[in-house]
C-alpha cells in the first residue's frame, strides 16, 4: 500500500534576516518525534507511527529555487506532503511546486509575522517576504493569517493590496476561527507560539499562542490538507529541546488531521 503522506526536510536558513539555525531543525524534530519520552499517538487516538508516512529524507539546499525542483520531485498528486524547514522562505518555492499539481490553493498561515514585505534587507526572497511572492504569483486565492502581532504600516498596506485576511493575535477568538471550504495548505511558523513555550526561534515575539491554543486551531481544521510546513524552529536558541518536542507534537497533530480529513 502506498503511504498516504510524504515528508521532506529542507535544510535551508540562508534567507533568515537575524540569526541562522533553522537548517538544523529537521534532524532535531525527527529526534524529538522518535524520543521515548513520549509516544507516537495524536490526541484523537490515531497512532502516527513512521509506517504511515514516507520519509523522503533531508535535502541540503545550494540554490534557493532548488527547493521548488526538489519538492516537485518529492510530490505525487493527491498525496499530501509535509515539509520540515528551514526558515520561512522555503514556503514560497514549496507552494510553487504544489501549484503545478493543484493550481491555486487556500492557505492558512499561522505566524507572529505577516511575512508580507515587498523586500527585506534588499532581498525579495527573504523569510520576511514569502507571502508577498505567493500572492503576486497568485499561488493562493485566499490567504488567512492567524497570530500576527508585528504589523507595521508597510505590511498593513501589503495585506490590504493582496486581500489577506488577518486574525491578529490581539483579536483572536478561538470560538470564531476562520472557516475553510476548499483543500488547504497549512504553514506553521513556530514563532507564533509565545516564547515561554517555544523559545527555540530566531525571532522571539512575546504575547503569542500557548501550545494548547495552536493545537486547538489545527484540530478544528475541517477541510482536506494537501500540504503543510513547520518552519523557523531554531535549535540553537532552544532550551532543553522543549521547542523540538513542541514541533514533534505539532507534526503528529497535523498528520493525524491529514489522515482524518483527507
Ligand atoms: Mn514566518
Ligand atoms: Mn514568524
Image (tube, rainbow, N blue to C red):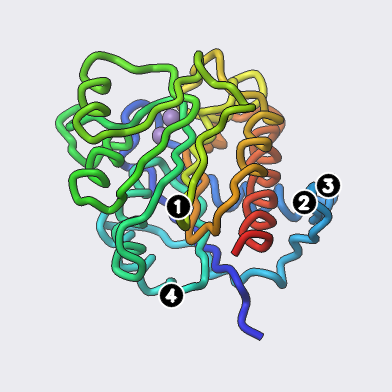
Q: Which residue is located at x 48 percent, y 30 percent? A: 146
Instruction: Give the alpha-carbon distance from disc 4 to disc 1, as whole Å.
Output: 14 Å
> Label 2 belongs to which residue?
42
User: SS at mark 2?
Assistant: loop
Instruction: Give the alpha-carbon distance from disc 3 to disc 4, as whole Å.
Output: 33 Å
Give the percent coordinates (x, y) of residue 113: 40, 26
> Label 3 belongs to which residue?
38
> Label 1 belongs to which residue?
185
> Label 4 belongs to which residue?
77
User: SS at mark 3?
Assistant: loop
Q: Do the residues labelled 2 and 1 touch (CB within 8 Å)?
A: no
Q: Do the residues labelled 3 and 4 touch (CB within 8 Å)?
A: no
Query: In the image, which is nearer the foreground, mark 2 or mark 1?
Result: 1
Instruction: Give the alpha-carbon distance from disc 2 to disc 1, as whole Å.
Output: 20 Å
Give the mark nearer the N terminus: 2 vs 1: 2
When asked about the image quadrant of residue 116, the answer is top left
Q: Are marks 3 and 1 in contact (CB under 8 Å)?
A: no
Which of the labelled discs sits on residue 66, or is there none? none
| Left or right placement of residue 156 versus residue 221 in this view | left
User: SS at mark 1?
Assistant: strand
Give the percent coordinates (x, y) of residue 251: 64, 50
**Around disc 3, counting alpha carbons within 10 Å, would you say few (fewer than 14), some (14 to 19), or many (20 or more)?**
few
- Quadrant of the frame with the N terminus: bottom right
Amino acid at each position: 500500500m502506498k503511504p498516504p503522506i510524504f515528508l521532506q526536510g529542507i535544510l535551508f536558513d540562508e534567507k533568515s534576516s537575524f540569526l541562522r539555525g533553522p537548517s538544523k531543525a529537521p534532524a532535531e524534530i525527527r529526534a524529538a518525534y522518535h524520543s521515548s519520552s513520549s509516544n507516537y499517538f495524536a490526541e484523537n487516538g490515531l497512532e502516527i507511527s513512521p509506517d504511515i508516512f514516507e520519509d523522503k529524507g533531508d535535502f541540503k539546499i545550494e540554490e534557493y529555487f532548488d527547493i521548488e525542483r526538489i519538492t516537485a520531485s518529492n510530490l505525487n498528486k493527491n498525496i499530501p506532503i509535509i515539509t520540515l524547514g528551514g526558515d520561512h522562505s522555503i514556503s514560497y518555492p514549496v507552494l510553487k511546486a504544489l501549484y503545478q499539481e493543484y493550481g491555486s490553493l487556500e492557505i492558512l498561515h499561522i505566524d507572529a509575522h505577516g511575512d508580507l514585505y515587498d523586500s527585506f534587507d534588499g532581498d525579495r526572497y527573504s523569510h520576511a517576504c514569502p507571502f508577498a511572492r505567493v500572492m503576486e504569483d497568485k499561488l493562493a486565492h485566499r490567504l488567512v493569517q492567524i497570530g500576527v502581532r508585528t504589523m507595521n504600516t508597510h505590511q498593513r498596506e501589503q495585506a490590504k493590496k493582496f486581500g489577506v485576511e488577518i486574525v491578529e493575535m490581539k483579536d483572536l477568538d478561538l470560538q470564531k476561527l476562520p472557516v475553510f471550504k476548499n483543500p488547504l495548505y497549512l504553514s506553521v511558523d513556530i514563532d507564533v507560539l509565545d516564547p515561554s513555550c517555544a523559545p527555540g526561534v530566531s525571532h522571539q515575539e512575546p504575547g503569542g499562542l500557548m501550545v494548547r491554543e495552536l493545537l486547538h486551531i489545527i484540530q478544528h481544521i475541517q477541510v482536506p490538507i494537501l500540504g503543510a510546513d513547520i518552519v523557523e524552529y531554531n535549535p540553537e536558541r532552544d532550551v532543553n529541546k522543549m521547542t523540538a518536542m513542541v514541533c514533534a507534537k505539532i507534526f503528529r497533530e497535523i498528520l493525524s488531521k491529514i489522515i482524518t480529513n483527507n
